[in-house]
Image (cartoon, rainbow, N blue to C red):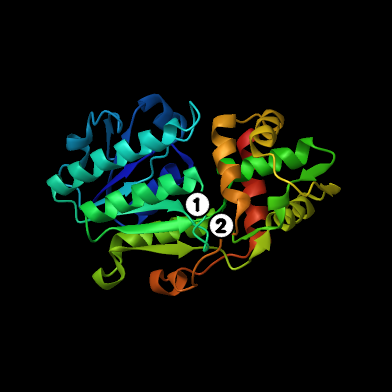
Amino acid sequence: MQTLVTGVSGYVGAALVPRLVRDGHSVRGFARSAERVRAAGVELDELVLGDATTGEGLERALDGVEVAYYLIHSMEGAPGAFVDIERRQAEAFARTAADAGVRRIVYLGGLVPHDGSISRHLASRLAVEQALLDAVPESVALRASLVVGARSRSFVFLVRLLERLPVLALPAWSTNRTQPIDGRDVLEFLAAGAALSARHAGRAWDVGGPDAMSYADMLRRIADVMMIDRPAVSLGFNLTPVASVVAAAVAGEDPGLIEPLMESLEHDLLPRDDGAAAAFGVRLHRFEPAVERALRDMEVQVR
């Protein structure tokens, strides 16, 4: 099967390519920079250079493709600008995919709160999801919370905070709950999405790990695996704009990425049901083993 992987130099895209090749797919990549793809160590049958925002290269990239993986995110830069950029990128990709006769688009987005209170980050993910599902009806959207992996920027961000802060100042949202998922399981869901039966397609699936926990508990459990002690102080209030700037500086991250992510934590982010694992045939890893694996991989990367 001819597949296309966008965002191929990113964490998920780079890891997905060898998984698809193992399954016998012919894999074409789409990226803005060949240098970044080489730096990520990705080996492809073909690489098309282009820009999802302008539409450059999309027709060539999608020509003859049966299944396209849409793994493009644009959260950094001017505050709030990513919302319009992501919408335009998704609409251009969706139109071109439909015109090219693509059978299915597989998209990785984010879990949404049950109470309907949606941050701009998650609202943008939903808008992208809807554009793709509307254009190619047999598409599949996966909604995940924090992905545990050595190249997952959200996970690495938490590890860096734990390494560099002697005391954790926890905002009020730290009592909210989520279900982080092992990066290996995300890859299995994505790979299975290409071959998913038509009766399971055309919709969004919530995917989460088997362990539900508060964000404060998640930090404590990561610290336990790292074998470090980090006392925590509960603030009882949220100061997301200020906290995101401080946390980004401590962790060496871009505040343009961290602030919208923190906004999304002000509500529980839990799967609506647990049917995805059975439908996709994925056996989920528990949280501590996922963290152990990710930390080992991080150590290998810095050697």
Residue that label 2 marks = 182
The residue lying at 66 percent from left, 30 percent from top is 245
Q: Judge whether residue 14 can be spotted in this image.
A: yes
Residue 278: x and y in percent read 44, 74
Residue 215: x and y in percent read 68, 54
* Label 1 element class: loop
User: Foreground residue, 100 or 86?
Assistant: 86
The residue lying at 47 percent from left, 35 percent from top is 75
| Residue 118: assigned label | 1
Looking at the image, how many numbered discs can be counted on the residues? Answer: 2
Mark 1 closeness class: few <14, some 14–19, many ≥20 residues within 10 Å:
some
- Could you tell which of marks 1 and 2 lies nearer the N-terminus? 1
Quarter in which the C terminus is drawn: top right
The residue lying at 18 percent from left, 51 percent from top is 102
Picture layout, residue 118 above or below residue 40: below
Picture layout, residue 165 above or below residue 237: above
Is the residue under label 2 in contact with that under label 1 (CB below 8 Å)? no
* Label 2 element class: strand
User: Foreground residue, 224 or 138?
Assistant: 138
Q: In which quarter of the image is residue 139?
A: bottom left
